[in-house]
Each structure stands twice: as C-alpha cells, then as structure tokens.
Image (cartoon, rainbow, N blue to C red):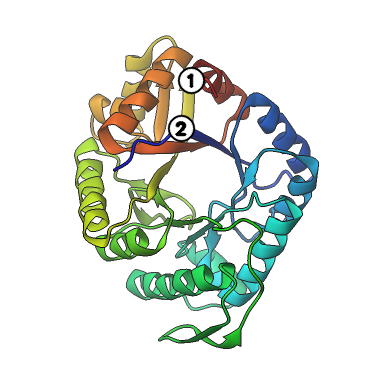
C-alpha cells in the first residue's frame, strides 16, 4: 500500500455547540488538517452536519468530515444532498464518514429496530454504493435489499471526487469498504457495553496485523489502495510512558504494556515519543491519518512532525 503523508483530525466535543466554530478555528491555526463531528442523539448534542456548514464559512483550509454518521439515521439521498451542499459552501473541502451504528439506546430513542450487526453492515454497504454515485452527480436507480431509489439526483460535489470514509469491523464489511471507500476507519472494537456507548477493545497488535493483512489482500485483488485512519481514543502526555501504559493494562484497554504502546488507538509518552509512535504505526500498518479529541495535548506533535 502507498505510504501517504500524515493527516491529523480533531473531533469536536459532542456537546460544545456554542464553541464549535471557535474550536475549529483554533484547530486550523494549530495545524490540524480535518475537523470532525460525531453522530449521537441526546440533549444539546451537536448534529453531524450542521456545525460543519458553519465551520466551512469560518475557516479556509480545514477539511470537514463527520466521524462518523450513523447510516441508519440518514437516508442516503438526504445525506448526499447535504454533503454536496456543504462541499460547495466550503469550496470543495467536504468528506463524508459513515458507519453502521452501535448505540442501541439511541435506536430505541428514535423508535428504530436495532438489527443484528450483519444486517446493519449490509444496509451500510448499500448506502455507501448509492452515496458514491450520488456524490459523483449521477442520476441513480437502485433496488437493493435495504435501499431503493428511482431517478434520484442531488447534483455533483464541487470537488471532482468527494472522499468517503467507512468505519467498520469484520472481514466482509472491510472487504466491501476496500472496494468502495477512499478511507477505511480502523476501529478494532468489540461488543457495545451496557451503557450503549463504550465498547470492548481489541487493541492487540497481532489482531491489527491480521486486519491490515486482510485489507491489503483485498486491495490487491480489487486494484484499489484505500487510506487507513485511526481515532486515537486517549492522548496521555507523560515522561513515564511505561507506568502510564501499565495503568491502561489495569483498566483492561489491552492485554499487555507492549500492546498499549504499539496500538494506534492510544498515544502515550512525551510529544517526541508520540511522534515516533505515529511513524512506527505508519511503517507497520500503513496508517497515515490520525484523529484525536484533545486539541492542546496533541498540537505539539503536529509541530514536531512538520504539520
């Protein structure tokens, strides 16, 4: 797979409606490349697309990408219409991240059936295929098991090819993402826990080795070369990397200190150590696109890496 330049994204706090635009402007000034929203249901929770429209007119360089919209909450026709509009508003800086959904309490709040994961992933796959065609300006007829469109069109995006990020787990879903997505959002998460938001983690380095090998095999077979992205769940700046990693093992985030220090989903150590860690992740797994939730703690790493 191609070694790509690094990209760095910042995911906005989900309840900071008033400060979203200002935070995005600070992120742009700090060297971040992409601003992210998320897609959850709750009081005072930022929706995934509306803030990006405001950020589009308040920034100059930042790319805009929800990480990720829940495909079950958005019909692909309406989603494509909004994404194309924001792409034009931003001068061609929009990307779209989409996933299969996981928070069963949110489905209950919306009055939606929480289908088994294979069904949700199959529905996501159809939405991704339809989105690609709509974003490219096609008039789409589509009759799938989950999505039906008749002579549907939204007009083309401003940029020639608006990137689609798909965040999924599982061999079948990943194979489909390789064929249809521009970026694969690696997660390596297990079942959703009882709170409906958090997950079991599967951050053993050997598991990610196997997952990336599968992605590379599918990429060769399909003649494609998707970008790989990871959401860094924690940035811990410390002079004692080993002790911090040991505490994370005790919390159950990964089985060993070695796994904690290797996984791309955690960034632990001094800013210099974290920068070296990201280079190691790109060398081992081909991950070049890292997203974080802590603007200030991670910003010096971007500077060290020339971002």
Q: Secondary structure at mark 1?
A: loop
Q: In which quadrant is the C terminus drawn? A: top right
Left/right placement of residue 156 relative to residue 216 reads right
Find residue 242 and report its image quarter.
Answer: top left
68 and 105: which is toward the camera: 68
Q: Position of residue 283 (x, y in %)?
A: 29, 30
Residue to which mark 1 is pinned: 305
Q: Position of residue 43 (x, y in %)?
A: 71, 57
Q: Would you place residue 111 above or below residue 289 in this image?
A: below
Q: Residue farthest to the front?
A: 160
Left/right placement of residue 277 relative to residue 87 reads left
Q: Is residue 225 visible?
A: yes
Residue to which mark 2 is pinned: 6
80 and 73: which is toward the camera: 80
Q: Would you place residue 113 above or below residue 304 in this image?
A: below
Q: Residues within 10 Å of mark 2 (few under 14, many from 20)?
A: some
């Amino acid at each position: 797979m191609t070694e790509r330049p690094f990209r760095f994204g910042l995911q906005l706090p989900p309840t900071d409606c008033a400060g979203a635009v200002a935070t995005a402007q600070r992120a742009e000034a700090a060297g971040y490349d992409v601003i992210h929203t998320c897609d959850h249901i709750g009081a005072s929770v930022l929706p995934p697309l509306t803030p990006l429209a405001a950020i589009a007119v308040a920034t100059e360089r930042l790319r805009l990408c929800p990480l990720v919209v829940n495909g079950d909450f958005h019909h692909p026709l309406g989603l494509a219409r909004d994404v194309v509009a924001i792409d034009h508003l931003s001068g061609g800086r929009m990307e779209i991240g989409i996933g299969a959904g996981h928070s069963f309490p949110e489905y209950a709040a919306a009055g939606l059936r929480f289908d088994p994961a294979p069904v949700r992933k199959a529905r996501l796959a159809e939405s991704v295929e339809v989105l690609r065609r709509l974003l490219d300006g096609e008039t789409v007829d589509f009759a799938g098991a989950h999505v039906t469109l008749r002579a549907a069109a939204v007009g083309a995006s401003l940029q020639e090819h608006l990137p689609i990020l798909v965040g999924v787990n599982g061999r079948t879903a990943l194979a489909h993402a390789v064929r249809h997505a521009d970026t694969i959002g690696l997660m390596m998460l297990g079942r959703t826990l009882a709170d409906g938001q958090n997950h079991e983690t599967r951050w053993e380095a050997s598991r990610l080795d196997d997952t990336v090998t599968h992605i590379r095999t599918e990429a060769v077979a399909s003649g494609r070369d998707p970008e790989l992205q990871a959401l860094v769940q924690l940035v811990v700046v410390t002079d004692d990397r080993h002790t911090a990693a040991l505490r994370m093992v005790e919390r159950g985030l990964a089985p060993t200190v070695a796994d904690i220090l290797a996984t791309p989903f955690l960034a632990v150590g001094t800013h210099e150590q974290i920068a070296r860690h990201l280079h190691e992740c790109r060398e081992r797994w081909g991950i070049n696109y890292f997203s974080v939730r802590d603007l200030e703690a991670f910003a010096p790493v971007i500077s060290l890496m020339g971002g």
